[in-house]
Image (spheres, rainbow, N blue to C red):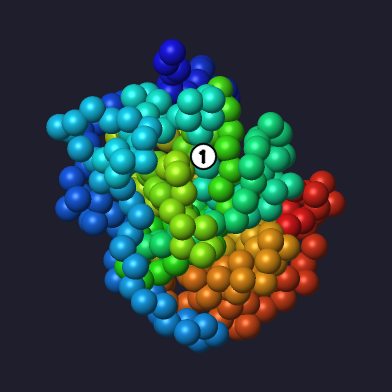
Amino acid sequence: MTFSLTLSLSLSSPRSTIAFPRRLPLSPVEVASFPNPSGSATSDHHHHRRRRRPSPITMSSSDAARSTSPANQSELGELNGETDFETIVSPDGRISICGFGSLLSERSARSTFPDLINFRVARLNGFRRLFAHAAPIFFERGIAKPETKEISSLSVEPCEGESLIVTVFEISKSDIPAYLERELEFRFLAVLPETLDGKPFDNLAVLCARYSDEEFFRIRCNGSKDIYFQLYGRYGIDKIWRDDILPCRAYLRHCVLAAKNLSDASYNNFLDHTFLGDRKTTIREYLATTGSGIMEEEPPESLKSRYGG
């Protein structure tokens, strides 16, 4: 059985359809070239430097039939269309999701996916977190501060030598279209997390990674300025992925609390392996300087539950 990955979004203009077309598989060179403007992140001041680990981004292959068996999972990379997502659906009709920001909170994850199962902690090697893209949802909820450029949400990008503590959980295949609609601005990657003691998972998980403005406009908006306006332009956002913006304050606080509630290791990992758009300043450093006071600020009453960590 197949399912459609065409998203029909309810916009204020006539209904728009945003498709995820099938594209050619990525080569190892293309995977390695995902945006990573300034190389490896700064060193960790609070933990020993870890040995460099290979990236868990899995490579695509156009030459062999894919299967969900572990032996063949290394053949899949970027998830571009229906066939790719079908490939990593488990025999019981579920797909694994990798959470690195708000989805570090099980409560937050369940507010989006009430029927998720097997929520657990994992490690993902070869990526760093990054506050470097504007998010319309913060404007909709009244917590964006464009006057101070505090409008950024969180993504990840490949970075050799980095390692993240994340969460993994399973959702039903029927929830995938809603997931894609929620995470429309991202590149979808198939990655292989591991347990905290280094054992690789049996199944691939979907990860929302850094995308690009050019691809978003051409692929997700079908080259339509009207669709882009409804999604981003009406909020004054003329560029999504940028390195000169700062985290949305309420959202950053939420993510930090989510990491802290997960475990001490997750908390420290978030502080030391999450960066501003400059790819130099860690969130630990930011909260101790320019962002001081953020953790003491309560979100608006109507958002206290959603942004409560």
Q: Residue at x 53, y 63 (%)?
A: 196
Residue 305 appears anywhere in the view: yes
Q: Quadrant of the N terminus?
A: top left
Q: Is residue 226 left or right of residue 32?
A: right
Q: Quadrant of residue 222?
A: top left
The amino acid type of the residue labelled 1 equals Ser
Residue 252, placed above or below residue 285:
above
Q: Is residue 213 above or below residue 147?
A: above
Q: Is residue 17 visible?
A: no
Q: Is residue 138 left or right of residue 152?
A: right
63 sits to left or right of 232: left
Q: Residues within 10 Å of mark 1 (few under 14, many from 20)?
A: many
In the image, residue 45 above or below residue 148? below
Position of the C terminus by quadrant: bottom right
Which is more toward the observer, 244 or 269?
Answer: 269
- Look at 69% across and 32% down and name the residue there: 115
How many discs appear?
A: 1
Residue 44: x and y in percent read: 47, 82
Note whether 127 is above or below 82 in the view shown.
below
**Quadrant position of residue 248:** bottom right
- Residue at coordinates 67% horizontally, 72% vertically from top-left? 264
Measured as percent of width and height from the top left, residue 113 is found at 66, 35
Q: Position of residue 259 (x, y in %)?
A: 65, 63
Pick the front one: 178 or 104: 104
Residue at left offset 33%, top offset 51%: 57
Determine the image quadrant of residue 11.
Answer: top right
Please state which of residues 99 and 297 is positioned toward the viewer in this rendering: 99
Q: Residue furthest top?
A: 1
Residue behind mark 1: 96
Secondary element type, mark 1: strand
Residue farthest to the left, as pictured: 63
